[in-house]
Image: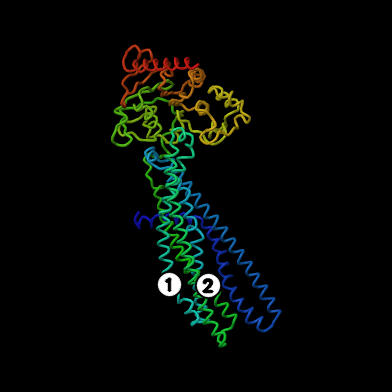
Amino acid sequence: MNRNSSRTNMLRLLKVIFSYKRLHFIASLFMIGNSVSLLVLPFLTMRIIDSAIQEHNVDQLVQYIILYLSISIVQGGCKLMSDYTYSIIGKKIVFDLRLKIVKHLQKLTGKFHANAKAGEIIAVINNDTSMVENLSTSMIFSTVSEICTAIGVFIYLLYMQPDLLLFTILLQPILFVSQHWFNKKIVSMNNEYRDLFGQFIVHIQELIPSIIPIAILKGRKYFLTRFIQTGKNILRKGTKLEVLFSANMVVTSLISSLTTVLILGYGGFKVIDGALTIGGLIAFLQYSQKLLGPIIQMVQINMKYQQSVVSVDRIFNLLDEPIDISQDNRGYSADIKGDIEFRDVSFSYDGNKSVLNGLNLVCGKGSINALVGESGSGKSTLINLLMRFWETDEGEILLDGVNIKEFNLAYLRKSITVVSQDVFLFNDTIYNNILLDKTGVTEQQLIQAAKAADIYDYINLLPDGFHTVIGDRGVKLSGGQKQRIALARAILQDSPILILDEATSALDNITESLINENLRLFLSNKTVIIIAHRLSTVENADQIFVMREGRVIECGTHAELLHSGEYYYNLYSTNVEMKQIHQTLSLSES
């Protein structure tokens, strides 16, 4: 990432920051009140000591103390309200960025998601957006406030004690140089730490949903080896980073102490000589701290800026990922009847090895169609293309005679319901997983859908029924129960096109047969595409497309294809033999 790009991204962030003009205006008023109060307090300290105490004026002392406390309360209130307002702004900015990223991720193609590392994306959404929060709000504006305050203090001190001011700024170049050196080291090391932490998140993201599969695969040692190595690297880098932070604070504190000693030493001589009052010396010391603050703040904000630049670039690089699938919200959205045609479609995931080669296929409205073939023949790829997660390399896909690229994308996907072998379920109740965002569903319709999917009796036995929480990705359910919930969900979606991609693979033959019989009542006037390895599932299809090496090599009914004695016949014969072997093994085990 070059400097021009980083500068452009930072300007884009500033546009987001200043979109909350009203809140910034309110926060600025409180910040001004805070700054003015802080400027007045040292002057009151001087008046209390030099006027009230020196002159033994009790009434004046009480008045100054009450005034001091009142201004302190005002200052504290202004600081609290300023911080509170900027906290709101910061949280809003972070939420806006996270929402933009999540929405953008949903628009990206399967090609992006196939190559992306989930852990790195999580790190951007979580860590990088948090990194820009301070830079986005109070840090920028408090620094401006402190600089303005410092200018006022400098002018006042120059008028008050110019020679004492010289001792105040004597060591500031050393402070600035040391801060610059430390910040450069800290930024570099922090970026390395962030990259390591991204790797750590990747490992965690792999583990959490896969603890049981890792144990089954005997991959525990392999996982722990990588996890421990990354953890040790984070430990070493994190320790060095903390030592650098600590050393920076020590050097800053030392220079600040030396400055204080110089002021007290020289100022003390002036007090002894009568050229300066004690109150004046104390006030000068307090004002001098306000000169040091902006210098340290400017160097620290530069450090935060350098750290944030990397995060800002990562955020906008993700937001700038090209959307290869057009998102035309005004696209074609007429009622879909369900006529599907793949016309001379060719496709490759990586641009080299073709998955589909000039494929032609027609599914008529209201028909039940089956796709069969060996693994890798391109069956599931047809679904990815029909849903427009990828675009075809050549050819076109027509829906009711209209190229699917002309459809409103959200409407297109809403019109197609897919039940896959790998069912996704939210960590929520069965009720919410079946309905999702479907509205207007009656309790009777929900029960009918659950009964048709042969899951109602199981749900009814649960203590919380439909309101049972099923865990992350439905971990509390068996594979068959997950598929039946997905089928119930598909029934309620009532889309004109239904795709069953190995949707009953986890069910036994009897349960599958029962569900298939129940589903017939809900499939009228729907275009159904069934992808299955278990060929008994597709025997009653209106037409069966036999795929091999990305082409349709046979098409017909089950009886017609068996009669031809070609590829489908061999697949079916093998399937029947395997079924008989499984049945024999089951009988021998029992």
Secondary structure at badge 1 equals helix
Q: Residues within 10 Å of mark 1 (few under 14, many from 20)?
A: few
Quarter of the picture holding the N terminus? bottom left
Residue 326 position within the rendered picture, expressed as x and y whole percent measured from the top left: 38, 39
**Amino acid at circle 1:** Ile
**Amino acid at circle 2:** Gln
469 lies above or below 320: above
Residue 504 position within the rendered picture, expressed as x and y whole percent measured from the top left: 47, 23
Looking at the image, which is closer to me, 504 or 580?
580
Residue 57 relative to residue 484: left or right: right
* Image mark count: 2
Residue 510 position within the rendered picture, expressed as x and y whole percent measured from the top left: 50, 17
Q: Which residue is mark 2?
A: 289
Regarding residue 332, the answer to whether it shows in the image is yes
Q: Quadrant of residue 331?
A: top left
Q: Nearer the viewer, mark 2 or mark 1?
A: 1
Secondary structure at badge 2 equals helix
Q: Quadrant of residue 29?
A: bottom right
132 lies above or below 437: below
Point 43% across, 17% down: residue:
582
N-terminal-most mark, 2 or 1: 1
In space, the residues marked 2 and 1 are separated at their CA atoms by 16 Å
Looking at the image, which is closer to me, 105 or 572?
572
Q: Which residue is mark 1?
A: 174
Point 62% across, 63% down: residue:
77
Q: Residues within 10 Å of mark 2 (few under 14, many from 20)?
A: some
